[in-house]
Amino acid sequence: MPANSGFDFVALDFETAHLYFPCSLGVVVVRNSEIQCVKSWLMKPICYPYFHFYAQKIHGIHKQDVEFSPCFDGLWEEIKPFVEGTTLIAHNAAFDINVLRKTLQYYHLTKPKSNYLCTYQIARKTWKEQSKFSLDFLCNQHNIIFEHHKADQDAIACAKLFLREMEVLEVSSFTELKRKLQIRSPKV
């Protein structure tokens, strides 16, 4: 049985219009270490119609792309089942989890009962000899092909990177991972 058999988690990635204001979300459901479902949403950000020019340059989403999209609170009932009661995985999770927290707080929505792990932090402990730990760099190093800064594609890449990290670390459970790397899995 491979070292990474049996992992159940949801990888997620937000793209933002400005600061912590999401305009896109991608989620990837992984069951028994296999990708089962990929979903993505465009959403009208809290700061609409403002989009920071640099954000637009990075992800290519503009105000006209979300003009008729619902706001996050209008999508929450559809998104919530994906993120409730699971381990969330993100690359540079501090950013994505803060986007989720701040958006939920803005709309007075209850935080999901979930915990999270960060593939960036795991990579720093897994490949200590590396000088870079960005998602695109690590994916390139491990032959994970994706279109960067597209929420669903970044979430897929993150899921695959996490599974690769588990393989390299030769761990088969979250408990074993946390013990081996001496990391915790904070609550959302």
Image (spheres, rainbow, N blue to C red):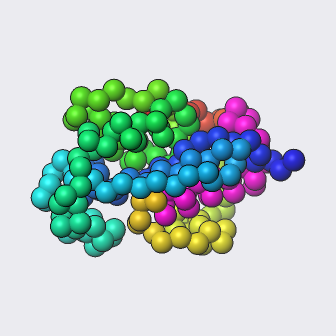
**Side (left or right) of 16 relative to 167:** left
Q: Nearer the viewer, residue 94 or 188?
A: 188
Instruction: Tell me which residue sits at (74%, 41%) in the image.
Output: 6
Instruction: Tell me which residue sits at (46%, 46%) in the image.
Output: 93
Regarding residue 46, the answer to whether it shows in the image is: yes
Instruction: Tell me which residue sits at (52%, 29%) in the image.
Output: 85
The dominant secondary structure in magenta is: helix
x, y (%) of residue 36?
61, 51
Instruction: State the extent of the magenta-drawn residues as a range.
Output: 153-176
Which quarter of the figure is the C terminus placed in?
Answer: top left
**Side (left or right) of 166 relative to 13:** right
Q: Nearer the viewer, residue 85 or 94?
A: 85
Asked if the stretch drawn in magenta spans residue 175, the answer is: yes
Asked if the stretch drawn in magenta spans residue 134, the answer is: no
Q: Quadrant of residue 49?
A: bottom left
x, y (%) of residue 97?
40, 41
**Side (left or right) of 182 relative to 109:** right
x, y (%) of residue 111?
37, 29
Q: Nearer the viewer, residue 44 or 117?
A: 44
x, y (%) of residue 66?
22, 60
Regarding residue 126, the answer to whether it shows in the image is: no
* Residue found at the very far right of the displayed protein: 1
Instruction: Tell me which residue sits at (62%, 47%) in the image.
Output: 30
Q: How many marks?
A: 0
